[in-house]
Image (cartoon, rainbow, N blue to C red):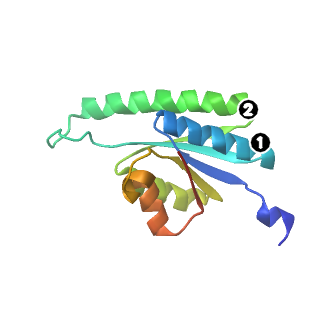
């Protein structure tokens, strides 16, 4: 294998501002710094809140997008401090589906996601992590 084939060029990080997402981002940054010149794509997906009947008020979705954009900008600042350039993405819809669609567009060498610690496998991995694992399209790193 040629050296350039082994190195990471593009990492996609699912991000929602949680402690788990922040740890995943920090891990991706560490990988990026060690590989040099890695694009770090940070993505947040806004989804319809549970328990809100359809149609969801557009003002509610807009306020969620504003909050998500702030989380992404904060994450971007963390990446910038490591002397890397963040590329941020804000999507709307089902998080697993939208992150996978984004991955299909940007073709990451690695997807990094945070997860909560629970007892069952889907809860251990999280629904988005499970979605990626089932797709078998991209290498996945799950950070607890």
Q: What element carries label 2?
A: loop
**Residue 32 pos. (x, y %):** 73, 45
Task: Tell which circle, 1 or 2, labels the residue nearer the N-terminal end.
Answer: 1
Residue 137 relative to residue 78: left or right: left
Q: Is residue 120 visible?
A: yes
Q: Which quarter of the rendering shows the N terminus? A: bottom right
Taking the spot 57% from the left edge, 38% from the top edge, the residue there is 23
Q: In this view, does 9 lie above or below 16?
A: below
- Quadrant in the rendering for residue 28: top right
Q: Can residue 36 be seen in this view?
A: no
Per the image, the residue denoted by label 1 is: 33
Mark 1 secondary-structure assignment? helix
Q: Is residue 4 left or right of residue 63?
A: right
Q: Where is residue 33 in the image (x, y as percent from the top left)?
A: 77, 42
The image shows residue 131 at horizontal and vertical percentages of 42, 60
Q: Residue at x 76, y 33 (%)?
A: 83
Mark linked to residue 82: 2
Q: Are marks 1 and 2 in contact (CB under 8 Å)?
A: yes
């Amino acid at each position: 294998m040629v050296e350039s084939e082994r190195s990471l060029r593009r990492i996609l990080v699912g991000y929602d501002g949680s402690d788990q997402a922040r740890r995943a981002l920090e891990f991706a940054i560490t990988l990026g710094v060690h590989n040099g010149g890695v694009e770090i794509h940070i993505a947040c997906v806004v989804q319809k809140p549970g328990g809100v009947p359809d149609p969801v008020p557009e003002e509610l979705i807009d306020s969620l997008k504003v909050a998500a954009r702030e989380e992404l900008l904060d994450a971007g600042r963390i990446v910038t401090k490591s002397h890397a350039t963040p590329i941020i993405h804000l999507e709307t819809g089902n998080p697993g589906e939208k992150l996978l669609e984004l991955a299909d567009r940007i073709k990451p060498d690695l997807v990094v996601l945070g997860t909560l610690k629970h007892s069952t496998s889907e809860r251990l991995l999280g629904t988005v992590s499970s979605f990626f694992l089932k797709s078998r399209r991209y290498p996945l790193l799950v950070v607890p």
